[in-house]
Image: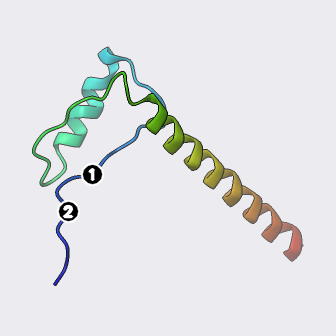
Amino acid sequence: MTDRHAGYIVTLGSDVREDDAAEVMTALRMVKGVADVQPVSGGHEQSLGAIRERVRWQEKLLDLMKEMTVYSSG
């Protein structure tokens, strides 16, 4: 038997101004099965910051691996 997902947490790459967020929220609402989209503001900065930092490290590691591949093949 497989587990069921009740929801997902989506972390944006950077903060979005409230007046610019309408387009992002509309797009997320268009995803099949999305019941609601609510912005997260204040109080979650530490969690969001940790996720963003992890993504930055992953991107840097991938860039380094690509560089090493080019260097070793050339």
Q: Quadrant of residue 15?
A: top left
Q: Secondary structure at mark 2?
A: loop
Q: Quadrant of the N terminus?
A: bottom left
Which class describes the residues within 10 Å of circle 1: few (<14), some (14-19), or many (20+)?
Answer: few
Please provide percent x and percent y for residue 37. Answer: 19, 36
Please provide percent x and percent y for residue 39. Answer: 26, 29
Please provide percent x and percent y for residue 14. Answer: 48, 31
Residue at the image point whose x is 10% and y is 45% from the top = 35
Left or right relative to 25: residue 53: right
Q: Nearer the viewer, residue 46 or 25?
A: 46
Residue at the image point whose x is 48% and y is 33% from the top = 46
* Amino acid at pointer 2: His
Q: Nearer the viewer, residue 25 or 7?
A: 7
Residue at the image point whose x is 39% and y is 30% from the top = 44
In this view, 22 is above or below 65: above
Please provide percent x and percent y for residue 61. Answer: 70, 57
Q: Write down the residue under mark 2.
A: 5
Q: In 3D space, how far apart are the residues under numbered discs 2 and 1 (Cα atoms)?
A: 8 Å
Residue at the image point whose x is 17% and y is 68% from the top = 4
Cβ atoms at labels 2 and 1 below 8 Å apart:
yes
Q: Write down the residue under mark 1.
A: 8
**Colouring scheme applied when the structure was drawn:** rainbow
- Residue pushed farthest top? 19
Q: Nearer the viewer, residue 71 or 52?
A: 52
Which class describes the residues within 10 Å of circle 2: few (<14), some (14-19), or many (20+)?
Answer: few
Q: In the image, which disc is placed on residue 20?
A: none
Q: Nearer the viewer, residue 25 or 4?
A: 4
Q: Quadrant of residue 25?
A: top left
In this view, 54 is above or below 16: below
Q: Secondary structure at mark 1?
A: loop
* Amino acid at pointer 1: Tyr
Q: Quadrant of the C terminus?
A: bottom right
